[in-house]
Amino acid sequence: MFKGTRQTIFFLIISLFVASGVAQANSVTVYVTFFELSPDPVNIIVGDTVYWIDGDGDGPYAIFGSWGSVETGQGIQFNQADTYSHYDENGIQGTIFVTES
């Protein structure tokens, strides 16, 4: 009985170590209103996604950046570390900092 229990515990411990080494992508929501992008700046890591959401009910709003444009309700996954500037159709500017980790 103890032999099976020890094997199960050993398996669980090894599984936790393996799982802790796996990076998971996250997402950040930026609320777009007529007057602001919030939060700003946005700090994420490579592989994360930023979603722009209509924050005041007056949208949809168009968001522009080096990737082209998206509308509120859409997101972009950032797969390269860099600093990205973006702005909405009202000229409100924001910054996204993407780091390796």
Image: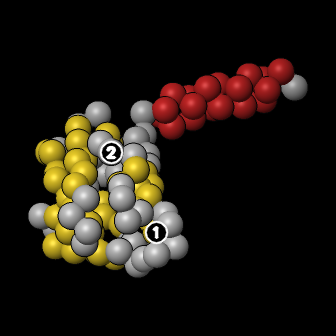
To which quarter of the image does residue 79 belong?
bottom left
Q: At which x and y percent is residue 94?
A: 25, 51
From where the camera sits, is residue 2 visible? yes
Residue positioned 72% across, 31% down in the render:
8
On residue 19, which mark appears?
none
Q: Which residue is mark 1?
A: 54
Q: Secondary structure at mark 1?
A: strand
Seen from the viewer's position, the closer of residues 6 and 92 is 92
Seen from the viewer's position, the closer of residues 17 and 47 is 47
Q: Is residue 60 above or below residue 94?
A: below
Q: At which x and y percent is residue 10?
A: 64, 25
Q: Amino acid at mark 1?
A: Asp
Instruction: Point out the image quarter for the C terminus.
Output: top left
Q: Is residue 99 above or below residue 51?
A: above
Residue 55 falls left or right of residue 82: right
To which quarter of the image does residue 67 belong?
bottom left
**C-alpha gap between disc 1 and disc 2:** 15 Å
Residue 82 falls left or right of residue 60: left
